[in-house]
Amino acid sequence: MKNNIFLTILAGCAVFMTGCESSGNSNASDEYTRMRINMIERQIKARGVSDKTVLDAMMKVERHLFVPKELEARAYADYPLPIGEDQTISQPYIVALMTELMGLKGGEKVLEIGTGSGYQAAVLGEICGEVYTIEIVEALAKRSNALLKKLGYKNLRVPSSYRYINPF
């Protein structure tokens, strides 16, 4: 009987501790969600982007995952951010505007030139049937390819070879 009570208390503590741990992650997740909603309302909708498909894609794609760890708190700000290799992730409004101007209906095949962090590709991946994306900076191509795979995008095609002819 004492063993059963001990195991019950132990199991209860484990559940409590697991709940506490995930609530910490949940708080961070809730904060990023709040930041994304704010970004969409104040930066994107307020400037006239109204395509529901685009707005839904922008809400779903977690921009903080596409920036360096030390910049995550600024991921939803109204400006581009450095992603390394002298490149930047585009301002959220610009990503939304470019996507809306494409007039996508869903299911299209799209070619993106300049994968960068993979953020625009992920937004397009939420709408399009297939996205082919090319990046000539090897370090960025490898990083974005790994992230997009980790996030489960199966409709994005990132070359596995980064060889190219650099005309510059």
Image (spheres, grey):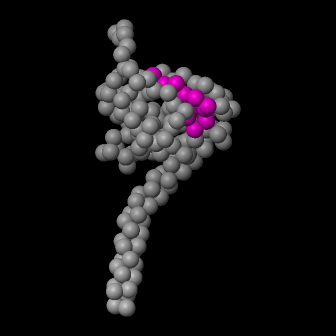
Does the magenta run of residues contain 81?
A: no
Residue 39 vs residue 3: left or right? Answer: right
Visible residue check, residue 75: no
Decide which of 97, 84 is in the foreground and name it. Answer: 84
**Percent position (x, y) of residue 134?**
45, 22
Left or right side of 76 for 40: right
Tell me where residue 21 appears, x and y as whole percent.
37, 65
The image quadrant that residue 90 belongs to is top left
Identify whether 138 is placed above or below 67.
above
Q: What residue appears at the point 64 percent right and 27 percent down from the top-left corner?
A: 108
Q: Position of residue 15 (x, y in %)?
A: 40, 73
Give x and y (percent) for residue 100: 62, 32
Nearer to me, 28 or 38: 28
- In the figure, residue 96 lies in which quadrant? top right
Seen at 61% across and 31% down, the residue is 129
Q: Which residues are magenta?
A: 124-134
